[in-house]
Image (spheres, rainbow, N blue to C red):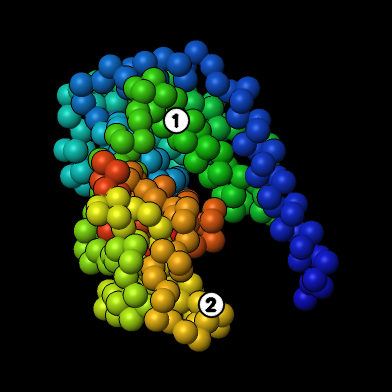
Amino acid sequence: MKNNYEIKNIAIQAIQEEAKAVAALAQYIDDDFVTVINKILHLQGRVIVTGIGKSAIIAQKIVATLNSTGTPSIFMHAADAIHGDLGIIQQHDLIIAISKSGNTPEIKVLVPFLKQTKNTLVALVGNTESYLAKNADYILNTTVEKEACPNNLAPTSSTTAQLAMGDALAVVLQECRDFTDQDFAKYHPGGALGKKLYLKVADLSDQNGKPSVQLDANVRDIIITITQFRLGAVAVLDGAQIQGIITDGDIRRMLERHTDLATISAADIMGKSPKVIDKNELAANALHIMRENNITQLLVSDQGNYDGVIHIQDLLKEGII
């Protein structure tokens, strides 16, 4: 068994070894990389990414990243390709084959069939003298000095390098296409990331009631309104204009200070500088304001007029936090 110090040291060494492998990739960003980028940018078809073993897992992640950043992509398992999945490949597609050695039996069987399709073949490979590299049209070099594995066997640094090269492709393509956060949101409508980019304050606040009292409201009316809407606060208005906010905490503090409640009105209790957000702002911005000010609700406005309340629980339910 290893002691605590040794466990930490082994983990640190593994991370440092992989970081070193990723940093070394910078020297391999060459003309082939640029050409592959330009080919994908002008591609009429899709990017087909294939691999075997751990490289297949990396291929799936690269496909997911490309798809989410605006490059239509499909994963094709190298072993399944020769058993019917080659039909995935269409005339205008570009193929990226991922392999550390470039000499695995499955790759050697697959490459001739890929060449027959006459599609552009890109090797994302850790051995530039391999069978795959020599038969590819372009090479994305992911050579690593050694694996983080103590036996230099288990794919560790090599798969991290493959992943980083795939991310480099995706990021460059994203920049070249001026792919915005709104574009990103279109491809992530159901996820927390997408919701941060498209969900508006009104999408959440409209599901709540709109608790409000006027400036001259008495304590009883204020407490009833806060209790009825269960949002922990009520807006204080002059007509439709926001003048302040009263939270349940404000009520408790007021009760501690006063015994005669008959003459106390909303104007006496309210906080006079409430945090307000426009209904058309992103819900993620509401979360930022709440966190920055250590509060749990915001008043919502519509062209300056009161339009409701958004509560931190609304954001929790949507998974934005």
Q: Is residue 208 above or below residue 242?
A: below
Please tell me whether mark 1 sits on a helix, a strand or a loop. Answer: helix
Which quarter of the image is occupied by the C terminus?
A: bottom left
Location of residue 141 in the rendering, given as x and y in whole percent from the top left corner: 54, 27
Image quarter for residue 132?
Answer: top left
Residue 156 visible in image: yes
| Spatial CA span between label 1 and label 2 | 53 Å
Residue 52 visible in image: no
Residue at 39% across / 70% down in the picture? 265
> Which residue is more in the foreground, 189 or 31?
189
Location of residue 257 in the rendering, given as x and y in whole percent from the top left corner: 56, 80
Q: Which mark is first along the chain, 2 or 1?
A: 1
> Which residue is more in the foreground, 133 or 218?
218
Please tell me whether mark 2 sits on a helix, a strand or a loop. Answer: helix
Q: Is residue 152 above or below residue 113?
A: below
Residue at 72% across / 46% down in the picture? 16
Residue at 56% across / 44% down in the picture? 160
Q: Label 2 belongs to which residue?
A: 253
What amino acid type is highlighted by mark number 1? Val
Image quarter for residue 42?
Answer: top left
Which quarter of the image is occupied by the N terminus?
A: bottom right
Q: Residue furthest front?
A: 263
Q: Residues within 10 Å of mark 2 (few under 14, many from 20)?
A: few
Q: Residue furthest bottom?
A: 259
Location of residue 248 in the rendering, given as x and y in whole percent from the top left corner: 43, 75
Q: Is residue 181 left or right of residue 117?
A: right
What amino acid type is highlighted by mark number 2? Arg
Location of residue 110 in the rendering, given as x and y in whole percent from the top left corner: 32, 37
Q: Residues within 10 Å of mark 1 (few under 14, many from 20)?
A: some
Mark drawn on residue 171: 1
Residue at 80% across / 71% down in the picture? 4
